Image (cartoon, helix red, strand yellow):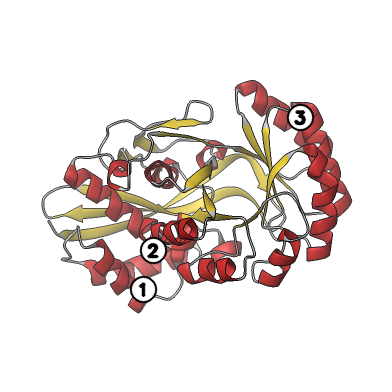
Amino acid sequence: MRIKKIEAIPIKLKLKKTFKTAIRQTDCAQNVIIKIFTDEGLVGIGEAATPTRITGETQESVLAVINNIISPLLSGSEVFDIERMMEKIDSHVVGNTCAKAGIDIALHDLLGKTCQKPLYKLLGGYRNFVETDHTVSLDTPEKMAEVAETLVRKGFNILKVKLGLDPERDIQRVKAVRKRIGDQIILRVDANQAWSPKEAVKIIKSIEESNVELVEQPVKAGDIEGLKYVKNRVEVPIMADESVFSIEDALRLIKREAVDIINIKLMKSGGIYSARKIISIAEAAGIECMIGCMIESRIGVLAAVHLACGAKNITRVDLDGAMFLQDDIVIGGIKPDVGIFKLDESHGIGIKDVQKV
């Protein structure tokens, strides 16, 4: 079975309300849906997000790379030759990890559909369900506490709180949320690179009594020594996010013993193929992984769910991206029950099609 045509479709997905972090705020997601058509009639579906402040990509750049470079490169390729195709793409395109991820997801969806198996069974089949956290967007301590309480009442057992605009207010944010939700809810915090190493140590020590499970990306992405400085001076586990795009990034952090946990996102790694390498390297080093997402539809999110269910070393998930969207444009595929994604026997990632928007 060979690739006949690749189609890239721009979409604009409005959010229910503005989503705010220390490095950006947004009211919508301008993503790209990818469809890979085969000569035997099967269609693989993928998605590329465009978090410009993180990967440098835009909707226009994703469309250009896919239409002008990747599509001609892969035309006529055998759908099972994923490693060969990804190598070919990497040899012609530097960076552009979201565009690569969209193609990679569609290829893996095709793999499952061709084998008539759910994708997670082909990626290890370790479990068939995962529980995601839900993120609390950056705001005043009072408003964040209110949102957190509402989410807990809805049934979420794990929350992630965005921090980073002001150190003292960040401490107040965590304490206000913990006081409102009680002691039984798992609480994670994410600074999105906002603190200096010394600020991070001070803040983390101040919130340790709030029983925080982990702190995500406390310092700048490129500050490996800063990550190590923080990790060695606090009790709360430190997780790298923006610091890890590639296998090489993961190796660099592991060699420096700079982090406790690695957060993988398909849009950073360039898709499932490269993400699996990072997972294996981390597992060999005794470092657990979380898998996260950008603001994505259920296509990108479910691809990550399948990977999480396939891999033992993914021990946490942060896959709430589609929950922030006003509309669900995806046809088919499982939907979460509050924070639980339980996969069924649908082939590939389970998506049938996308509504026109």
Separation of marks 2 and 3 at Cα, in angstroms:
38 Å
For the question of whether residue 339 can be seen, the reply is yes
**Residue at 46% across / 67% down in the picture?**
247
**Residue at 46% across / 48% down in the picture?**
313
Q: Secondary structure at mark 1?
A: helix
Kind of residue at badge 2: Lys
Q: Secondary structure at mark 3?
A: helix
Report if the CB atoms under discs 2 and 3 are less than 8 Å apart.
no
First-in-chain label (2 vs 3): 2
Q: Which residue is mark 1?
A: 90
Give coordinates of residue 285: x percent, y percent.
51, 60
Report if the CB atoms under discs 1 and 2 are less than 8 Å apart.
yes
For the question of whether residue 59 can be seen, the reply is no
Which of 239 and 193 lies nearest the eye of the viewer? 239
Quadrant the C terminus occupies: top left
Q: Which residue is mark 2?
A: 100
Give coordinates of residue 32: x percent, y percent.
41, 55
**Residue at 51% across / 55% down in the picture?**
264
Give coordinates of residue 333: x percent, y percent.
35, 34
Kind of residue at badge 1: Asp
